[in-house]
Image: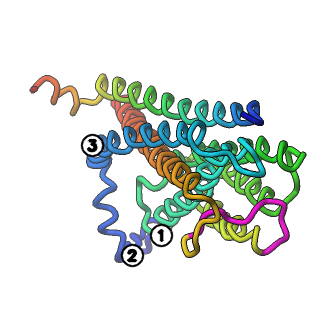
Amino acid sequence: MLRAVDTIPIPMPAGGRSLHRFANPGRFLRISGRVLPFLAIPALVLTVVGLAWGLLVAPPDYQQGDAVRIIYIHVPSAWLASGGYLSLAICAALSLVWRHPLADLAAVEIGPVGAAFTALCLATGSLWGKPMWGAWWVWDARLTSVLVLFFLYLGHIALVRAFDDPVRGYRAGAILALAGVVNLPVIKFSVDWWNTLHQPATLSLTGAPSMHVSMLWPLLVCIAGFSLGFAAIVTARLRAAVMERRIRGLLLAQAQTV
Amino acid sequence: MTHLPYIAASYGLAVLIGAGFAVDAWLRVGRARRRLDAIDPRRTRGRDAG
């Protein structure tokens, strides 16, 4: 007997089975409930310490004066803009390849947070650019590629909510997220590939940082605090999304039995 | 401090966005937990037993 194509089970790729052990909503809620305080409390402490250190203790720049203190917001938010999108793309891959049930929900919850930090990066860049460059905005390669990243986030947010069937929205959003990954190396290397008004990278994994240690430490503390804060916010949102999905399922089951 | 309005606006925006998302997530989790406690039979059974 012939079977409809969409009823034929597709074997899961090898790596997916171990991933799916963590996909059980009850297990996720238990584990994330234990992990969340260890993300949220250090995030709050590190962010407050880092921002106070950068604002009150770190020295002003010899050329830029106190305007350099914007770096303690701008660089962590730029890091999260790109890092957040990378995590969105990883969730998209987990969803498309392994059909991981929590990956779609995670992508939906990462989108608005990543978009907000990208907007913060653009806004603080503008607030830094006006006194230093004399302009709120220039169509520089770095600024423009980050603006494209912001639009990719907005596109993802709109696309995952655009279908009556949420699964179709998740699939479309996942494809957009994966296609948009090409923008990440463009953002990273834009200051090397093109002659930009934006300064080259301050921090590098391979080379020495181009700033004094008295400014570097508060910046690293802020990056750590912002990153843990991002993880804590996304984890909390994902916990809420898992519970809301369970609520919808229960209400639907109740409605069908009536 | 030089460029104070630009610095204050940057730090203000950061606090607003960070705190806004944190409070929203915290309220959303609380709301979902209360709703789930009210309608989930497994949770109700657990509460009655313990």
In the rendered structure, which disc, 3 or 1, sits on the residue that comes first in sequence? 3
Q: Quadrant of residue A120?
A: top right
What predominant SS class does the magenta segment belong to? loop
In the rendered structure, which disc, 2 or 1, sits on the residue that comes first in sequence? 2
Residue A231 visible in the displayed image: yes
Judge left or right: residue A247 versus residue A116: left
In the rendered structure, which disc, 3 or 2, sits on the residue that comes first in sequence? 2
Residue flagged by tag 2: what amino acid is it? Pro
Residue flagged by tag 3: what amino acid is it? Arg
Provide residue A44's location: percent of width, then percent of height: 44, 37
Provide residue A167's location: percent of width, then percent of height: 53, 52
In the rendered image, residues at marks 3 and 1 fall on the same chain: yes
Residue at left 71%, top 71%? A189
- Residue A197 among those drawn in magenta: yes
Instruction: Report which residue position mark 2 lands on.
Output: A13
Provide residue A244's location: percent of width, then percent of height: 42, 35
Instruction: Report which residue position mark 3 lands on.
Output: A34
In the rendered image, residues at marks 2 and 1 fall on the same chain: yes
